[in-house]
Image: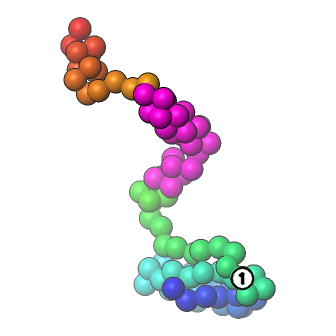
Amino acid sequence: MPRVGVRELKNRTSEILRAVREERAEYIITYQGRPSAILLPIDEEELEDYVLAHHPHFVALRERARQAIQKGEFATSSQLRTLLEG
């Protein structure tokens, strides 16, 4: 993955974004020589997945679920089926 400094990114924004959009190029953006961000191509479906995966509400739900699993607080699929079938 090529690296591009912020100054170069500023000077070549259109060219770099065109490469990301059309060639699905990926870049590591650096600031003072250190990695700062990653520029990746994304489509509408990937954007929705990203937003949902990083939304604070869903992050909190996943963390609560992990904690519950660690405590053994979960139901097996057969237990759920029994509950749902009544």
In the displayed structure, 48 sits above or below 19; it is above
Direction from residue 75 to residue 42 in the image, left or right: right
Extreme residue in the right direction: 32
Q: Is residue 54 magenta?
A: yes
Q: Horizontal and vertical percent for residue 56? A: 62, 42
Q: Horizontal and vertical percent for residue 37? A: 65, 73
Pick whichever, 73 or 39, lies toward us.
73
Q: Is residue 62 magenta?
A: yes
- How many numbered circles are shown? 1
In the displayed structure, 23 sits above or below 39; it is below
Image point 58% across, 37% down: which residue? 60
Pick whichever, 5 or 33, lies toward us.
33
In the displayed structure, 56 sits above or below 68; it is below
Image point 71% across, 82% down: which residue? 34
In the displayed structure, 27 sits above or below 12; it is above
Q: Which residues are the magenta region? A: 48-72
Q: Residues within 10 Å of mark 1 (few under 14, many from 20)?
A: few
Q: Horizontal and vertical percent for residue 57? A: 59, 37
Extreme residue in the top direction: 86
Asked if residue 29 can be seen in this view, the reply is: yes
Pick whichever, 8 or 86, lies toward us.
86
Q: Amino acid at mark 1?
A: Arg
Residue 73 quadrant:
top left
Image point 56% across, 82% down: which residue? 27
Q: Would you name the residue on which mark 1 appears?
A: 34
Asked if residue 10 can be seen in this view, the reply is: no
Dominant secondary structure, magenta:
helix
In this picture the colour scheme is: rainbow
Give the secondary structure at mark 1: strand
Extreme residue in the front direction: 71
Quadrant of the image containing the C terminus: top left
